[in-house]
Image: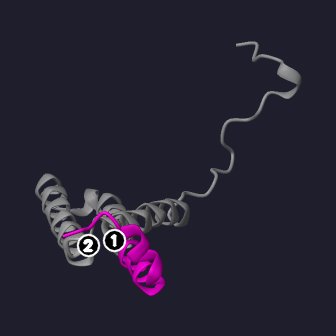
Amino acid sequence: MATPDALPALAATPLSAVMAVLAGAALGGLFYGGLWWTVRRTTRFRHPGSSLLGSMLLRMAVTVGGFYLVADGDWARLLVCLVGFLLARVAVTWLTRLPPVAGGPARVANGARDAS
């Protein structure tokens, strides 16, 4: 169980904090990468609803189990792991962004409006 002086204990062992952040980043990469993979392939699934539900349950089980193992009853380690998880969300969002569409909507020069 976490003690009131858990943060000083975590600061005393920076390796523990680094490992928790890396574990959170790995969990986040699996969770958000799996979400991206599932959504991209939804149209190819024979039963897309069941596939989305199955993917969500699997991703949630792995993530919650991973948080439980990393935290090991220490709230500070859980919080640091969550930071890594959120950083992975930003990274996966950035890595999986779509390129700009060529021939997309043109910008209107000098604030002029379309005459249509």
Classify the position of the C terminus by image quarter: top right
Q: Is residue 4 left or right of residue 84?
A: left
Q: Residue at x 32, y 58 (%)?
A: 39
Residue 24: x and y, percent?
37, 72
Pointer 1: what residue? 77
Q: Residue at x 24, y 68 (%)?
A: 2
Q: Mark 2 and 1 residues: CB-CB less than 8 Å, in contact?
A: yes
Instruction: Choose the circle earlier in sequence order: 2 or 1.
Output: 2
Q: Which SS does the magenta portion mostly show?
A: helix
Residue 100: x and y, percent?
64, 52
User: Which class describes the residues within 10 Å of circle 1: few (<14), some (14-19), or many (20+)?
Assistant: many
Q: Residue at x 55, y 61 (%)?
A: 94
Q: Residue at x 43, y 63 (%)?
A: 83
Residue 5: x and y, percent?
35, 67
Compared with 76, 113 (above or below) is above
- Circle number at residue 9: none
Residue 47: x and y, percent?
12, 57
Of 110 and 22, which appears nearest the observer? Answer: 22
Classify the position of the N terminus by image quarter: bottom left
Q: Is residue 11 left or right of residue 52?
A: right
Callout 1, which amino acid?
A: Arg
Residue 29 placement: quadrant = bottom left
Pointer 2: what residue? 71
SS class, disc 2: helix
Q: Magenta stretch containing residue 94, yes or no?
A: no
Colour convention of the picture: one colour
| One can see residue 92 in this view | yes
SS class, disc 1: helix
Q: Is residue 9 left or right of residue 68?
A: right
Magenta stretch bounds: 1-26
Callout 2, which amino acid?
A: Ala
Compared with 114, 36 (above or below) is below
